């Protein structure tokens, strides 16, 4: 019984050591920014969805795409020296937070392009005329 338990403990220890040595061979890339890359992809998807649904005008989408380009250039600059520092990661995160906020704000404002003609749709264009005409009738 004691022998079986000892063999079991040794087997567990050996498998743990093997797993640890297997991980030691893969050194993490100091310039990897998987979280920033995933957020960038999500934000690009949100912008495209906004264009397709008409929530974003072409002008708004262009402005948001330019903002994404600035973030991409900042990420390239951070990677240029071979290491992305914690401060650089925080800066990229702040830039992406701001971009996310801007996307949400632009998608939920009253500017729409539902017919996808590249111009803002007029909402309630005749509202003022109707109110004035009703005022004259009374």
Image (spheres, helix red, strand yellow):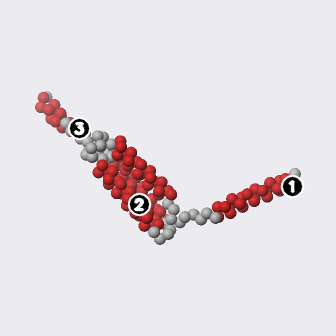
Q: Residue furthest left?
A: 136
Q: In front: 11, or 107?
A: 11
Image height of 48 relative to 89, above or below: above
Q: In front: 39, or 110?
A: 39
Local secondary structure at mark 1: helix
Per the image, the residue denoted by label 1 is 3
Marks 2 and 1: which is nearer the front? Answer: 2
Q: Earlier in the sequence, mark 2 or mark 1?
A: 1
Tell me: 11 left or right of 48: right
x, y (%) of residue 64? 35, 53
Local secondary structure at mark 2: helix
Check disc 1: other Cα within 10 Å, few if <14, some if 14-19, many if 20+: few
Q: In 3D space, how far apart are the residues under numbered discs 2 and 1 (Cα atoms)?
A: 59 Å
Residue at position x 50%, y 68% in the image: 83
**Residue 124 - label:** 3
Q: Earlier in the sequence, mark 1 or mark 3?
A: 1
Per the image, the residue denoted by label 2 is 72
């Amino acid at each position: 019984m004691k022998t079986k338990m000892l063999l079991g403990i040794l087997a567990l220890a050996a498998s743990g050591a093997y797993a640890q040595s297997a991980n030691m061979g893969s050194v993490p890339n100091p310039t990897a920014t998987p979280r920033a890359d995933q957020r960038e992809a999500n934000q690009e998807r949100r912008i495209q969805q906004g264009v397709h649904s008409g929530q974003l005008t072409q002008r708004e989408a262009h402005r948001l795409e330019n903002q994404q380009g600035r973030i991409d250039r900042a990420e390239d600059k951070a990677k240029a020296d071979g290491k992305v520092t914690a401060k650089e990661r925080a800066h990229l995160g702040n830039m992406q937070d701001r971009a996310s906020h801007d996307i949400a704000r632009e998608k939920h404002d009253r500017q729409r392009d539902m017919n996808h003609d590249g111009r803002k749709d007029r909402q309630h264009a005749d509202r003022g005329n109707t109110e004035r005409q009703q005022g004259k009738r009374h």
